[in-house]
Image (cartoon, rainbow, N blue to C red):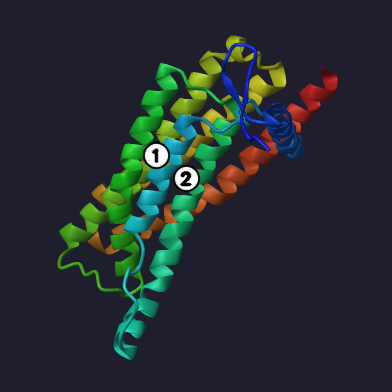
Amino acid sequence: MSYLALGTKGRVQWPFSGTLSVSTHMLRATLHQNHEEVDSDGIRLRGLGFSRLDGFSDVVFGFALTLIVVSLEVPKSFEELHRLWAAFLPFAVTFLLLMLIWYEHFTFFRRFGLHDAGTIWLNGLLLFVVLFYVYPLKFLFLTAFGGAATLNSWQQYRELVLLFAGGQATLYFLIGGLYANALRQRVRLALTPAETFVTRAACLEEVGTGCVGLLVCLLVAVLPRHHASWALLVFMLIAPLRTLTGRYSRRVSKRMGTAG
């Protein structure tokens, strides 16, 4: 039996190629049906496909995670295992914070699927900051949990906190910039009034989260040495701030969707 056949114009054809094409199309359709078309905030998901920008971004996030890994070598003694275990908690906290940034990034591109020049440049800046941010992030939590990292002076501690808080603020300002860019294109995206409200609220939420980081930078810079360490507690405002704004945004968007 021949496995190849010549088409009507002399091109080589595989048997059942039409069947395979139809099956692939059906599989993609099924996968898209398994995703909800509207997220919990009422925004229609316009970016369910996987683009080159998504792939590039995930590679960079994956590389950033390898930079915070505890060790690439299997411990050869109990002492090495003990040191590895001591670094586990700082690694877990650092991993969690990076995952939160990745989730915000994932949510935006799943909602809008934008690939315009503004989005590409803002995304590139975001990824650049992520790669730099992992170093002060890991160092800070290694120091906080008694890891191998050490600080020799108050000046070093203040500079480390400024790098950490400034990096956090920059990341969330850039995510807010992505939402502002999407809001600017609301006509092309055909955003409904409810979607426009949620997008604007998300932009303000990301900028507000970044402002918390700026506030920490300001407090560390101006407070006396024996009080400056308490400035890090300001980060605890982020969780209630985002929870309250998220609930308010969903409630208003549902009301607007019902009225529409």
For the C terminus, the image quarter is: top right
> Which residue, given by chain and number where applicable, does mark 1 sit on?
171
Q: Is residue 41 visible?
A: no
**Residue 203 position within the rendered picture, expressed as x and y whole percent measured from the top left:** 53, 29
Name which quarter of the figure residue 32 lies in.
Answer: top right
Which kind of residue does numbered mark 1 sit on? Answer: Leu
Residue closer to the observer: 81 or 179:
81
In the drawing, does residue 134 fall left or right of residue 108?
Answer: left
Question: Disc 2 or 1, which lies upstream in sequence?
Answer: 2
Marks 2 & 1, CB-CB < 8 Å contact: yes
**Which residue carries the number 2 mark?**
101
Q: Nearer the viewer, residue 54 or 141?
A: 54
Query: At which x and y percent is residue 130?
Result: 35, 44
Residue at image position (61%, 9%) is: 187
Q: Residue at x 45, y 42 (%)?
A: 58
Where residue 33 sits, quadrant-wise, is top right
Q: In the rendered image of this protein, does residue 258 appear above or below residue 206?
A: above
